Image (cartoon, helix red, strand yellow):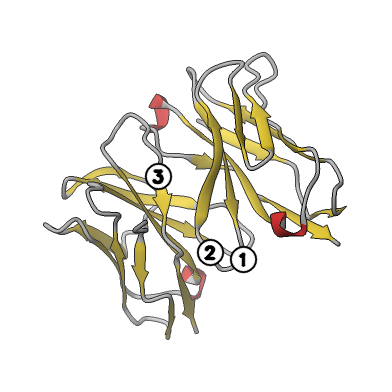
Amino acid sequence: AAGVIQSPRHLIKEKRETATLKCYPIPRHDTVYWYQQGPGQDPQFLISFYEKMQSDKGSIPDRFSAQQFSDYHSELNMSSLELGDSALYFCASSIGTPSYNEQFFGPGTRLTVL
Amino acid sequence: GDSVTQMEGPVTLSEEAFLTINCTYTATGYPSLFWYVQYPGEGLQLLLKATKADDKGSNKGFEATYRKETTSFHLEKGSVQVSDSAVYFCALASSGGSYIPTFGRGTSLIVHP
């Protein structure tokens, strides 16, 4: 079965650089969620989109922005990277919102900021 | 706000031992409760869930019962295998949080042969 695809899987950036992470949801899933998981930490919700509109906002820094495109894939743009942004970034997708439907998680993008 | 507290790890067991990972929660209303598993280098996978009090979620030999009176959702397995080694996250989702899951800190399980 098709799963959530994230690219790249690994990314190394310098401080103050920018990064773009991509997420391709499971076909027919219209909701995308982004999470940040620091080393040894629980996943923290950043932002979600439903039908290409932002639906919920969590602890996403102002330096980050995201959008969902017409084909439902999503991109997380991160600017002025800081050392503390080093983390595993997960994307998840589901069908519909707001009532809870199971989220399917991608394998994550590991971002390392040097 | 919503929160999840789970026991710290790592939990180290021998193969075929009994597993319990404790999880308690704080939430307004009646949340749905979940256990996710994360294998090394992979994303989170939903292991089991329960949506109302006294429901028991089960999957792959793992079980957890939604206990409203003790606000708990402890994960259990009667006989663990080496392949169960992973990090386990307890989570809840409620209408107060727009059904976005709130995760616990995760508990690492290490099973030795």
Q: In the image, is A42 to the left or to the right of B29?
A: right
Q: Secondary structure at mark 3?
A: loop
Q: Amino acid at mark 1?
A: Pro
Q: Amino acid at mark 3?
A: Gln
**A103 relative to A91, above or below:** above
Other-residue count near label 3 (Cα within 10 Å), few / some / many at <14 / 14–19 / ≥20: many
Instruction: Using the rendered image, report if marks 2 and 3 lie on a common chain.
Output: no
Residue underneath mark 2: B42
Residue underneath mark 3: A103
Circle 1/circle 2 CB separation < 8 Å = yes
Residue underneath mark 1: B40
Q: CA distance from mark 2 to mark 3?
A: 15 Å
- Quarter-wise, where is residue A50 in the image? top left
Q: Amino acid at mark 2?
A: Glu
Numbered label attached to residue B113: none
**B11 relative to A8, above or below:** above
- Residue ID at (38%, 46%): A58
Chain letter of mark 2 equals B
